[in-house]
């Protein structure tokens, strides 16, 4: 189990973690606010709001692991 789908693409079984692209977009908003003169202490602390689930079915088959259909249905990325 990993927190980044990069590892799943490299052969890991599952990953569940924050959407890195969405986090970078939010970071760009922070940089914009700071560039416009905002104080770091005035910026709110944010937590990720979007998470991604990735499953590598090749690895699941190699490990003889049965992935429930429901889990496959809700996954953001399924690697065949």
Image (tube, grey):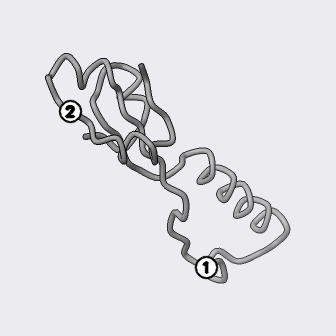
Quadrant assignment for the N terminus: top left
Number of numbered discs present?
2
Furthest residue in direction left, as rendered: 64
Residue 69 at what x, y percent from top left?
34, 41
Q: Is residue 24 left or right of residue 2?
A: right
In the rendered image, the quadrant that contains the C terminus is top left
Q: Nearer the viewer, mark 1 or mark 2?
A: 2
| Farthest residue, direction right | 36
Is the residue 45 above or below the residue 50 in the image?
Answer: below
For the point 81% across and 62% down, the residue is 35
Q: Viewed as shown, does residue 49 lie left or right of 67?
A: right
Q: Which residue is mark 1?
A: 44
Q: Residue furthest bottom?
A: 42
Which sits in the foreground, 43 or 51? 51
Along the line of sight, which residue is nearer the eye, 57 or 34? 57
- Between the residue at mark 1 and the residue at mark 2, the CA separation in whole angstroms equals 42 Å
Which numbered tag is attached to residue 66? 2
| Helix, strand or loop status at disc 1 | loop
Count residues near mark 2 (Cα–Cα under 10 Å), then give few for <14, some for 14-19, many for 20+.
few
Q: Position of residue 65 (x, y in %)?
A: 17, 30
Q: Quadrant of residue 50?
A: bottom right
Q: Quadrant of residue 72?
A: top left
Viewer-proximal residue among 19 and 76: 76
Q: Position of residue 9 (x, y in %)?
A: 41, 23
Local secondary structure at mark 2: loop
Residue 73 numbered mark, or none:
none
Q: Is residue 66 above or below residue 29?
A: above
Q: Earlier in the sequence, mark 1 or mark 2?
A: 1
Q: Residue at x 76, y 75 (%)?
A: 38
Residue in the foreground of this view, choosing between 11 and 59: 59
């Amino acid at each position: 189990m990993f927190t980044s789908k990069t590892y799943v693409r490299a052969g890991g079984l599952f990953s569940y973690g924050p959407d890195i692209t969405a986090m970078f977009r939010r970071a760009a908003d922070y940089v914009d606010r700071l560039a416009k003169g905002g104080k770091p202490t005035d910026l709110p602390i944010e937590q990720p709001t979007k998470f991604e689930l990735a499953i590598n079915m090749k690895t699941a088959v190699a490990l003889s692991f049965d992935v429930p259909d429901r889990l496959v249905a809700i996954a953001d990325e399924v690697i065949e």
